[in-house]
Image: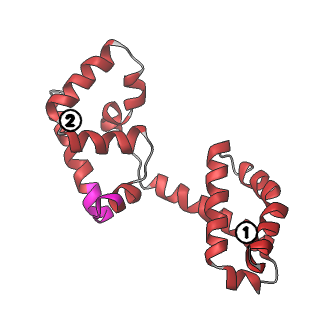
């Protein structure tokens, strides 16, 4: 381990617990707090030269965590679903409803291709952000939104609406 790695490890050990508490106070779950902290330290590692000369590295870490969370909230606001799509959007409650879930699964399988079903499950059930899925597919976010719009339209027509 070189000198920088040792210094970063020490910085991490000395700041993680307090940073985690700070992030939890933002009203996020334990796993979200861990994810934000991990992203924060990854950014810190990639900005090590800037951080090395920063007058307050711990403050920088806290401010970066704040911006990470603020960005997450902004992205979540951009992914709100209109009321007429609640039936499609609230897939998790449909899945918990026994008979309805079987009926819904059959309809989904008949109406949507395997690729479309995968996108729906990634977005609504697994909680991936549109930007993340778009990056995985190698397309723009706008292209992803158009795809999702078309999928929801197929679902509405398949449900007889």
Say above or below: 161 vs 119. above
Estimate the x, y position of residue 89 in percent, counting from the top left.
36, 36
Figure quadrant of the C terminus? top left
Figure quadrant of the N terminus? bottom right
What range is drawn magenta here? 136-145
* Nearer the observer, 61 or 94: 61
Residue at (54, 57) in percent of width and height: 72
Q: Which residue is mark 1?
A: 61
Estimate the x, y position of residue 55 in percent, counting from the top left.
82, 83
Q: Answer left or right for 158 relative to 64.
A: left
Residue at (22, 30) in percent of width and height: 108
Label 1 crowding class (10 Å Cα cut-off): few <14, some 14-19, many 20+? many
Question: Based on the displayed image, in which of its 4 quarters is residue 14 positioned?
Answer: bottom right
* Nearer the observer, 94 or 47: 47
The circle drawn on residue 122 is: none
Q: Nearer the viewer, mark 2 or mark 1?
A: 1
Question: Based on the displayed image, in which of its 4 quarters is residue 94 positioned?
Answer: top left
Q: Answer left or right for 84 relative to 125.
A: left
Q: Answer left or right for 83 relative to 127.
A: left
In the rendered image, residue 22 lying in the magenta stretch gets the answer no
Say above or below: 135 vs 31. below
Question: Based on the displayed image, in which of its 4 quarters is residue 120 positioned?
Answer: top left
Q: Which residue is mark 2?
A: 155
The residue at the far front in this view is: 1
**In terms of secondary structure, where does tag 2 sit?**
helix
Question: Whole-Å distance between the Cαs marked 2 and 1?
Answer: 44 Å
Principal secondary structure, stretch drawn in magenta? helix
């Amino acid at each position: 381990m070189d000198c920088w790695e040792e210094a970063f490890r020490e910085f991490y050990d000395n700041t993680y617990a307090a940073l985690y508490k700070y992030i939890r106070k933002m009203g996020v779950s334990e796993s979200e707090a861990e994810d934000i902290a991990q992203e924060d330290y990854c950014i810190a590692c990639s900005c090590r030269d800037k951080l090395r000369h920063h007058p307050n590295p711990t403050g920088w870490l806290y401010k970066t965590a704040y911006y990470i969370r603020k960005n997450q909230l902004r992205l979540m606001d951009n992914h709100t679903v209109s009321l007429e799509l609640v039936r499609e959007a609230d897939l998790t409650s449909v899945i918990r409803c026994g008979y309805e879930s079987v009926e819904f699964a059959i309809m989904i399988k008949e109406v949507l291709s395997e690729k479309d079903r995968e996108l729906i499950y990634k977005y609504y059930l697994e909680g991936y952000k549109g930007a993340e899925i778009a990056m995985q597919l190698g397309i723009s976010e706008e292209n992803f939104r158009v795809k999702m719009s078309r999928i929801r339209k197929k679902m509405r027509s398949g449900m007889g609406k």
